[in-house]
Image: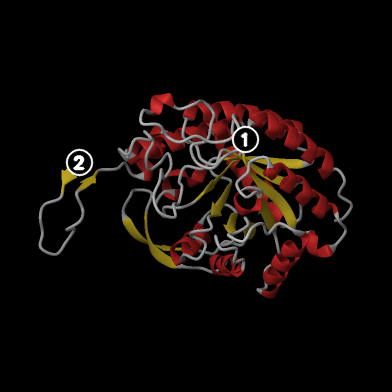
Amino acid sequence: MLGIMKEHPIRDIRILAARDLQSPAEMEEILPVSEKAAATVRNGREEVQRILRREDDRFLVIVGPCSIHDPKAAADYAARLMELRRKYEDRLCILMRVYFEKPRTTVGWRGLILDPGLDGTADIARGLKLAREILLQVNELGLPAGSEMLDPFVPQYTADLISWASIGARTTESQTHREMASGLSMPVGFKNATDGDVQIAVNAIVSARQPHAFIGITRDGEACIMQTLGNPDGHLILRGGKNGPNCSRESVVQAVSLLKNAGIRPAVLVDCSHGNSRKIPENQIGVLHETIRMRNDSDAPLRPLCGCMLESNIETGCQAIPADPADLKYGLSVTDPCLGWEMTASALAEAYKLAGGRHCA
């Protein structure tokens, strides 16, 4: 229901309208978690936790579209990726990157949840429903999902279907997001800042490990005070910065040192895209393989290298959103350029071979 805001001399003077929204509990009643999906989420979280704590020697790979914009293409991609998860599961732990929210430096399409029509209509109710439907479909395949947490209310709608979460480069310094991460039920990776500052992410990990209290919403959609226990599974994601990559041996050693100095047992992922690939999709392949080679090294400072993130889609590259969304090309990113499926499959096959060369515990 749309409510046009009435004029008031001091309140809501720039709010045009307020729309009703289903509570998280109401949406879950319509789209409940199946037993298989719940098992996938639990197992996915446990796998990631064990890898971060170095209790599982497999290499973590979080791979998928920069952003989800087409449910059909997302289901197609997930089915393909599930085959590779099964095929390589003894050396690689593969999760699908399922991102629905996109932070923006200025303006732009902000993701499926905020604008599912890709037309500026901001049908958020439909976007939340679509996101939950996609997550259910992915998890029911047996494929765990990873996603960025951006809006602090959205996790109440989606987090029960997510096995790994990230806090992006633009929000790592945000106290709101550190507090939110302290209460999330899955491991959370913090990216270094867009300028390449890693200390900001280390500070975020320290903060999210502590209990917090903040204003949130309940499952019934009511305002409440959330009190958290703190998240012990915060970890660092190196994503490069404005000065270029930070995935070299020297950069990893420096990052591990910062984590240790903060009293954190280090766990590091490398984002093969963004600054580390200079946004050239094919460059991600070299970053992935070199990260595994460094991890295979017996040097103790490199042992905390736990995994990589890859931006991948059905087709290589990206496209601008056309005036008529019906003109979109199938399987092609509408945000950052991605690796196509054939290159992704080839890159993961080589990653599997390389992951067998590790000779340190």
Q: Residue at x 83, y 63 (%)?
A: 300
Residue toward you, 226 or 111: 111
Q: Is residue 56 visible?
A: no
The 10 Å Cα crowd at callout 2, few under 14, some 14 to 19, many 20 or more, is few
- Quarter occupied by the C terminus: bottom right
Q: Residue at x 34, y 48 (%)?
A: 220
Circle 1 — which element? loop
Alpha-carbon span between mark 2 and mark 1 = 37 Å
Q: Quadrant of residue 132?
A: top left
Residue that numbered label 1 is attached to: 143
Identify the image quadrant of the N terminus.
top left
State left or right for residue 277 relative to residue 156: right
**Residue 127 image offset from top left, x and y in percent:** 38, 38
Q: Residues within 10 Å of mark 1 (few under 14, many from 20)?
A: many
Residue hosting label 2: 2
Q: Position of residue 142 (x, y in %)?
A: 62, 33
